[in-house]
Amino acid sequence: MKRFILTVLATLVLAAVARPSIAQNTNSSMKPGDTPAISGYEQELSKELARELRQFSPKTDNLGNVWVDFGSGEPHRLIATGMDQPGYVASAITSDGYLRVQRLPQASPNGVFDALNFAQPVWVLTRTGKKVNGVFAGLSVHLQPGRVNGPKMNHPDEMFVDLGAKSAEEVRAAGVDVLDPIVPQTNWMTVGNSGEAGLGALNHVDIGVLTALIREMKSSKAKGTTTIAFLAQQYTGGRGLNRILTEIQPSEMIYVGRVRPEQSADGKVVPEAPKPGAGAVLGSPSTAPEAGQKFVQELQAVAEKANIKSVSLAAAAPRIASYTKSAELPGRFVELGVPTLWPVTPAEYASLEDADKVQKLLEAYLEVGRPSSGVGGGTGSGVEQSVLQALVLAYGASRHEEAVRQVVLNRLDPRLRGKVVLDAGGNLVLHLGDGNKDPKTPRIAIVAHMDEIGYEVKKIEDDGRLQVDVLGGGYMQYFLGHVVLVHKKDGSKIGGVLELPNGWEKAGFEWPMSSRSMDEPARVYVGTQSKKETEESGIADGDFVTIRKEYRELLGTRANGRSFDDRVGCAALIAAANAIGSDLPGRDVTFVWSTREELGLEGAAFFAEHAAKDGRSPDFVFAIDTFVSSDSPLESKRFADAKIGDGFVVRAVDNSNTAPREYVDRVVALAREHSIPVQYGVTGGGNDGSVFVRYGSVDVAMGWPLRYAHSPGEVIDTKDVDVLGKIVELIARMFLPGRAE
């Protein structure tokens, strides 16, 4: 098993699993081992495979198929797998800089494929071989209450790719154009110690198996000719398979891929597919000729003799769609595959142990020796992180903010760190001022929250899965059906999958369009089969779970990441405090980096209550948090219409607070007098400052416009981040209730 894992990780495609944690430059060229292959756009991967296998004199055709021949004469056996995965192609560019898309294949591979890509990061692959970062637009849950007939986020008619551009001209200047393929930025992840998960995980495992097999074929004792092929356009009607069958006309074939149980004649009954751990899966149509049935029996005998765990079933044959008569499968045909969970979704899971069985069976069938080999190595990044990048990349779900606290402390000026107090609510508190303020000078608190949405392990079930409770709110489809990290108490992490809801694969399934649906317990699969096995991996009740994240640069000054809410606010407080330094004469200002905001403003409420008991309630509190913006093609512009890139926003009205207009106007005037771009308006959600109002404080919330809040697709303009830090500094230094300076 170890040899298989190392071999697969060394292959062309699986090298993409280990990605650097820092966002790649938007204009970086594609690198070997990081080459997605959307149906019909496999050319780059074909070239990479041909280069990878050049010592074996590979052949290619103009469709993109790549194959290698060994031996000569009869029988001529073909062993093949598909290289493509579903995705999208740019079908139009809007005047305001969004891409419209068409799915490839044009028929959806399942009912939730599109829904699971809303508010998720993507790459656009340009004609010059560059990858341009983008995200699919998604709804912001804060803006939907009361909305009539809003988008359902389940169809390409509602899909827009946001590159951070402001116009069609900016899109084309970045090298992006119509017909460029669009690839979900799948976070392939090792799940537990047992497998890989992510969109296209099975393809990557299968390609790894056949690549390894090619390298071992010099020791094969099989008679005749063996062709090992990687096929293009399998999702678009088996065009690569149709081509290779016509080209070489094999006498027998093993197709390595997903083995789908055969439906009943009326289509109403679909047998349950084998689960991970079943070993190699052999499949053949129930209508297969006698030669095909005999071939399955022969492979079963090979597996039994070699003590290889396997299972066989009646399976649907690979689809070959053609407007004319297509090539026929040879009589001796069998499918061979790895059991999968949640196929053709971002949660797709394939067991490496089962893949090892597939590889062993192929080796035994071809009488290949099994040489020992191993590959080591690693990746790293020497890129210096900005304050915002470091904050975004720190994981800290509500009640688990320690890593974020550490980044805040590390990024504060050393002269300030000694002044920071950790209170009993987990908040970091920094007080500045010399105690000699004028009676007219207000006591001010400036608050930003450190936590992010996530999940927490409630219990480990008997079958090894984790039952988790939600920490925060959002749309289920942004999280369920995607790979996750389980953060253990010792600081280490283990990969998992947030399981899709029951019935996801059935026709007519629709996602609940309410954040309250996240209150239902969810389950995380970590590749184990029992409670004991999960506990032995170090997972325990109380561990927290998050979607994996990166900081990705978009076009211009825009960026994508998850947890900009509220790491941008945290960064603004750090920038302001560092600019002020340890001396702030004549003022009384307290910076608070709060906890558990997503659970109901709990950290800020703790600080507010104890400040009141100590007689130090602030006169004014400025909660620095997201202004959830309708600056999106999916939102209604009726409210929350603050444009990203046009400056910070005074959050005058939200669901938790209404700021007095006179103080909104004073903040706006202060900003304009110092040439700081400012916006103001009404949005949804709540803010930390609202819990201070009961103690007599005035809450004037401020923030920055954010697209696609509470999703992996959050988008900001870093210009807004910069000016937010500046206005926070001015508030601390200069804000007075009676005048703007």
Image (spheres, helix red, strand yellow):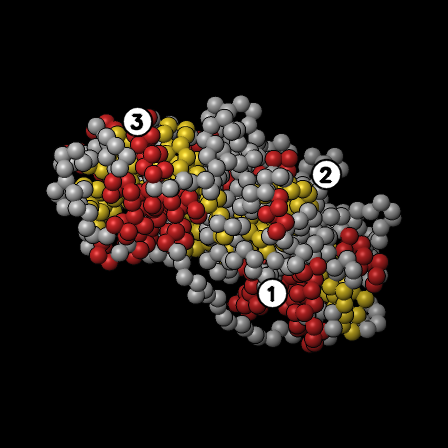
Q: Residue at x 48, y 68 (%)?
A: 378
Question: Closest to the observer: 306 or 534?
Answer: 534
Of pointers 3 and 1, the one earlier in the residue sequence: 1
**Left or right side of 64 for 714:** left
Point out residue 58 in the picture as x, y percentages from the top left corner: 74, 69
Q: Residue at image x 65%, y 42%?
A: 93
Camera-side mark, 3 or 2:
3
Residue under the image location 61 percent in, 51 percent down:
173
Q: How many other residues sit within 10 Å of disc 3, few (<14), some (14-19) or many (≥20)?
A: few
Helix, strand or loop status at disc 1: loop
Q: Nearer the viewer, residue 295 or 15?
A: 15
In the rendered image, residue 511, in percent from the top left (x then y), is placed at 54, 33
Type of amino acid at the residue the image marks with label 2? Ser
| Mark earlier in primary sequence (2, 1) | 1
Is the N terminus in the top left, top right, bottom left or bottom right quadrant?
bottom right
Which comes before the other along the chain, label 3 or label 2?
Answer: 2
Pointer 2 with pointer 1, Cβ within 8 A: no
Image disc number at residue 662: 3
Q: CA distance from mark 2 to mark 1?
A: 43 Å
> Badge 1 is on which residue?
32
Image-quadrant location for residue 110 = top right
In percent of the image, x 67 and y 65: which residue is there?
A: 49
What crowding class fits label 2: few (fewer than 14 Cα within 10 Å), some (14-19), or many (20 or more)? few
Residue beneath label 2, please? Answer: 264
How packed mark 1 is, by other alpha carbons closer than 10 Å (few <14, some 14-19, many 20 or more), is: some
Please tell me whether mark 3 sits on a helix, a strand or a loop. helix
Q: Nearer the viewer, residue 31 or 403?
A: 31
Could you say where residue 149 lies in the image, as x and y percent from the top left?
56, 24
Q: Could you tell whether 418 is left or right of 379 in the image? A: left
Residue extending furthest toward the right: 325
Residue 604 visible in the snapshot:
no
